[in-house]
Image (cartoon, rainbow, N blue to C red):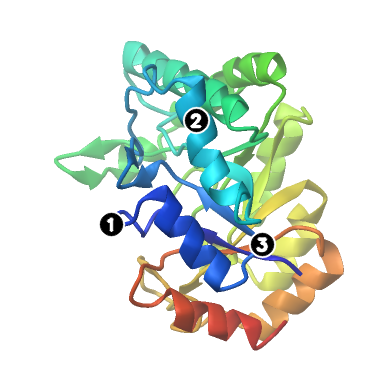
Amino acid sequence: MKIGLATLGFGDLTNEEMAAAAAEEKLDCVQLFLAQKDSKFFAYNKRSDVTGLAANECKRIADAYRSKGIDVPSIGVYTNLIEPDDDERQKNIDYFTEMMRVATDMGIRMLATECGAVIKDGKKNLDESLADEAYPRLIESTKKLIEQAEKYDVIIVFEPFFHDLLATAKGVRDFIEEINHPRIRVQLDPANLLPHNSLEEMFNALAPYVKALHAKDRTLHITPGVPAGEGDLDYAKFVALCKQYCPEIPLVIEYVNQTNYKQALEHLRLYL
């Protein structure tokens, strides 16, 4: 299987330096987050102004990786698609649409996101994030994004998380099948579903819809994720199921930075 690295934890590096680090580890790809020192635009669960990110600059960023043999199959967006304020939610959708333009200028055909969360006083408000009104907002936002995805010829992969609306393997599958559109697929991160599902349940439910994979870890009963090898995820079983169900999809290491990414990669490679 191919191995990749999410660029999110490497904000002190330029894209050229990030690409050099990936090439040194003989990685196959990166999942690009616009978080590098020379392209700081990423804003988790929010939005940023990328309207000034011109096509030639997009090409420069993508070419930093491809010139070293590193593929860039996807880019992270992660805006809030369930924002209760209609005007703010539409602005998030407009930002996502602009990110489709950026992705297209970079030659990227896959954009990753979560469903989003309502933040109050700097913290996730679970009552509002899981309220009855939130799911219809997610459906409405997704349908609007499908119209733009058709225009830009991209797909959107949703990443579930056990404290979000898309919190279980069955819940994610129900959402995908309700949307029923080939441009909406899944980015499976088993550590995000570990509190609710076994690895077998995740793959049995979602394998037909998985287009991207994350490889991090989680300690049971603890909310924050950790690097691969530092939690309770059974990596031998995880990798075996990846090989069985989706061997063509790269395993992208995340939740790492310059100090620990080599250890996480070493852990993953033990099972490859």
For the image shown, how many numbered marks are present on the structure?
3
- Could you say where residue 137 lies in the image, as x and y percent from the top left? 49, 23
Q: Residue at 75% across / 63% down in the picture?
A: 203
Above or below, comparing residue 16 to residue 202 in the picture: above
Q: What is the quadrant of the N terminus in the image?
A: bottom right
Point out which mark residue 28 bears. 3
Q: What is the quadrant of the C terminus in the image?
A: bottom right
Q: Residue at 44% across / 58% down in the picture?
A: 18
Q: Secondary structure at mark 2?
A: helix
Name the amino acid type tagged 1.
Asp
Name the amino acid type tagged 2.
Cys
- Could you say where residue 211 lies in the image, as x and y percent from the top left? 72, 48
Name the amino acid type tagged 3.
Asp
Task: Using a 10 Å C-alpha cutoff, classify the residue at mark 2 as few (fewer than 14 neighbours), some (14 to 19) or many (20 or more).
Answer: some
Q: Residue at 77% across / 29% down in the picture?
A: 180
Q: 162 or 1: which is nearer to us?
A: 1
Marks 1,2: beta carbons within 8 A: no
Above or below, comparing residue 169 to residue 72 in the picture: below
Q: 163 or 216: which is nearer to us?
A: 216
* Residue behind mark 2: 58
* Residue behind mark 1: 12
